[in-house]
Amino acid sequence: MAMVRVQDVGKAYPYKGGRTWVLRQIGFEVQEGEFVTIMGPSGSGKSTLLGILGMLDGEFDGQYWFDGEPVHDLKPGQRNRLHKHNVGFVFQQFHLLDDLTVYENLDIPLSYRDVPRKERQARVAEILDRFQIVGKKDLFPAQLSGGQQQQVAVARAVIAEPRVVLADEPTGSLHWGQGRQIMELMRGLNEQGTTIIQVTHDERVAGFSRRVIELADGWLSADREKIHVNETQARSEAS
Amino acid sequence: MNNLRHAMRQFTQHPGLSLCIVLMLALGIGATTAIFAVFYQVLVQPLPTPEPDRLVNIVRAGPADARGREAFSYPMFRDLEKGQTVFDGIAAFSELQMNLVHRGRAITVSGIFASGHYFKALGLTPVLGRLIDPRDEPRIDESPVIVLSHAFWQNRLGGDPEIVGETLTINGEVFTIIGVAPPGFAGTQLGVRSEIFVPFTMIWRLNPNQPRGMAENRNMIWVRMFARLAPGISAAEATVGINTQFRRILNEFELPQPTAPADQQQQFERQAVELVNGAHGQGNIVGASQSLRILLGVTLLVLLIVCVNIANLLLARGVELAVRESMGASRGRLLAQLLTETVLPALLGGLLSLPVAILTLGAIAPMLPARLAGGLALQIGTTAMAFAAGLTLATTLLFGLLPAWRMARMSPALAMKGQAAHSQGGHGAMRLRVALATAQIAFAMILLALAGLFSRSLTNIARLDLGIGIDGMASFSIAPRLSGYETGETEALYDRIAQAFIAYPGVTAVTSAMLPVITGNAMEVGLGIDGYENADQPITANFNTIGPGFFSTLAIPLRAGREFNAADMAQPSGKLIVNERFVREYGLGDKAIGRRLRFGPAGGDGWEIVGVVADAAYSSVKESAPPQIFLPRGALPMFSGTMTFYIRTGVDPDALPPVIPRIVAGVDPELPVSNVITLRRQAQENIFIDRLVTTLSVGFAGLAALLTAIGLYGVLTCNVAQRTRELGLRLALGARPETLQKLVLRQVAAMTAIGIGLGLAVAIGLGRVAESLLFGIAGQTPFIFTAAAALLSIVIFGAAWRPARRASRIAPMEALRYE
Ligand SMILES: Nc1ncnc2c1ncn2[C@@H]1O[C@H](COP(=O)(O)OP(=O)(O)O)[C@@H](O)[C@H]1O
Ligand SMILES: [Mg+2]
């Protein structure tokens, strides 16, 4: 069974007395463990779609099953619970909580999941270690570079061990050097089994995933598996 | 991390913001609580008795402001008391300042003559001994017993538990203490803290000025009554019952002669009594209820501005909440967090509001006349504290839940997108914040307009010519008849006192008068003028008896004739002085000197006018002088029992009050001195309501303007930050920085126009309500409103200046770096 299955999903905003459609008749599936990129021009509905997939936005038409659960039928509370147990978010603007230290930012998702204190400490320590940011744990976001902030944001997204990470232009605010590090991190997560759905404009970023879904003006315009081409192969083919 | 810790963190990490919120809350809640405390005490607080709602005041039917509405004759009271069945006792009372000597010390106390059913009607039980009951007034002049107020017993007699049975000397008569009233009870009159209670029948013994005839005379009305409704009897039933009886008594004793004019007959037919709510006791402070309502409204507006400000500050939180939600926080959890975060500043603000309230009361107290300041215990009582707590709770919910309510209407997915880059919570939130800031401008406009009206009114009052040279003067009162002086002895005493003051360094003149000036006191008499006929209009005038040199000492100009000399005092020589208004009113022209007046029926020599003086504020600052006559001090022995002295000094008049009691004690150590005050201060006290309302409304309006400026500054700063990209883009497209500044200022101009327009509309309506408190100015004075609007605009654009500048200084590359 597909982890994510959307069918006929549409989304409209009220506009000048009528409605304007931002997403129309979207349908696709994502299997557990996939690494999917959503691409498309600005305003084509990518972020909107991600919000629906991440169960932050429950107001849409059509059907969306997560793990066989009909998200479109869930009440807000149930949706929140499903979201809590399965989804981690990464944003273009990092959205770390400015008033909290790195350590506390990482602790937040666990506290929302009522993880016991002891275990929380252990897991934060573990993730600090894994992302090699132990030295930064008492700093505030403003004291970190953009790349470091996003690193913390990714750590925060996965600390509760979600099954899927949704990333909206995770490198959009970073230089490519920093962006690549973040993508390496994401690849690592994917290799360990986390499903990843990301939005990007950047072909280099898209290159980290196998599959690209393209949106144009709210329509799904393409959904293609890419043949994975690594750099050595590319060079040999070019020569 | 739990909510509370996070709340603490929020607090300490944004000390400026947090302090700002706490301070604003403290000011808003504190000011409101202080005004509420006064409001509650003057207008709401019931008497400290069981079931105060069952108490009624017995008054004459007719308009609420009719003169003598509350007064009945003594025989009428006794007749009503005897036959009535609808009440649990009718109480009569009268108030008198009494001279009391206890263990060799003389003091002036505020006393009550209480009829036998006074305490029964109130339903009070003593803490010691017993209270006055019908046993204590067998016949007039009998039964010298006294009940002490709890406060008097505690403060003056040290709460001595053996006090019952001891004796005190009041106005020269020995009284036996029979009991102590329960704590908190200080009589039933608003603004008067009565300290001792004696039987009503003792009034003739203790008040030498009280004519004996008043006990039988049905035409002299002076007794005030209240009663408690009997169990099971409604106010309506009691009204019917008491009126039946009232009518019967009238028909029996007061039926007019059949020959009396028709209108007199009709007037007799119309007489009836009415029962009005007596839960708050009797009396009111003139003009107080209207001004207190306005002031309470004013402070509530200030508080509203505070709430809006804080909500506006917290609304900037939209994105943070959305981020938290994206990490799995449920709505309930976010709500709990928001509330905890709000509770902390609210708690601190609420706590800090108490000192603010106390300081505000401290600022109010010196503006009140001394008697009133003592009579109203100006303090934050339990009710006021509960009120403050309630306000804190309400404001917490209001500004804590506004962001939560916003959040509920906002999709978190949306909150985090595009516009949200600078964590201001998106477009809708911005619109709400702009609307709130505009509302603040409207509120501030209302307050400034009102403050403008009151200030102008007070300036008008201050510009009035009192006609009295009040600078360099102090006054005090004595009541020698209450300390055992006989009528024949007072004249000599007054002379000795005058001499003692003349001998004091710096004193240039001393005089005296029965009624103190500029205190609102006045006595009116009907009279006849020889050779003056006007059947339509009875001739009346206010009168006062005065000592020698009264007009020269008070610097009231003499227009014709002469003023009294020492010889006029010694013998009632039948001379009097009138004012210019009297001359005008009764058409005496320039032939006033030598005309004769009479107080009784024609015959005898009457009184000869020997002088005409200028009109002055004899009684009140604001009222124009009524027709007034002055008689020599000794001329009416019946009124010579109390006297107010006026001292003019060439040095600082404020140095006089402290030494006055000492100088009087040098003449007679057992003679208490009261109402020691400089005349300038007396003139201020006479208009204390105006001063109070103006000072407070100006203060609150200033505060409101400041808060509005702060709020607007915050909103604009956010708005500019939020529009950084847009503004940067405009720059990149060739806009000049000044254009961007104008863009911001244009928005401010629109907000100001709308806010001031709305505020003005309300202010115009309120102006009409406030009109009764204004002097020499209409409730809708365009000049004042324009000035208020101009002032507010200056404040607003002052606050908008920096954010607007910032808009013009945006670096386009910085703004456009992303996307
Ligand atoms: N709250 C909203 N109200 C109306 N239209 C919106 C709202 N949010 C987004 N849109 C519109 O929906 C479309 C898709 O937005 P979005 O999903 O953010 O696009 P993308 O992420 O692909 O740039 C855009 O045209 C945008 O203007
Ligand atoms: Mg987007």
Image: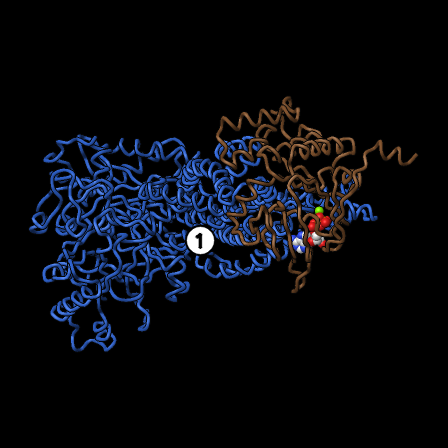
Rendered hue of chain A is brown
Q: Quadrant of residue A13?
A: bottom right
Residue B141 horizontal/vertical position (percent): 10, 48
Residue pictured at 78% horizontal, 34% vertical: A175
Q: Determine whether the residue tagged by mark 1 lies in a helix, strand or loop.
A: helix
Residue A234 horizontal/vertical position (percent): 86, 35
Quadrant where the image shows the C terminus of chain A: top right
Label 1 beta carbon within 8 A of ligand 1: no
Residue pictured at 36% horizontal, 43% vertical: B386
**Does B440 sit above or below residue B805?**
below
For this view, does B747 lie left or right of residue B189?
right
The one nearer the camera, B503 or A128, is A128
- Other residues around mark 1 within 10 Å, as few (<14) / some (14–19) / many (≥20): some
In the image, what residue type sits under mark 1? Ile
**Does B461 sit above or below residue B597?**
above
Count the labels in the image.
1
Q: Could you say which chain is coloured blue in the image?
A: B
For this view, does B734 lie left or right of residue A46?
right
Residue B697 at least partly seen: yes
Residue to which mark 1 is pinned? B294
Residue B706 at least partly seen: no
Q: Quadrant of residue A219?
A: bottom right
Chain hosting mark 1: B
Residue A193 horizontal/vertical position (percent): 64, 35
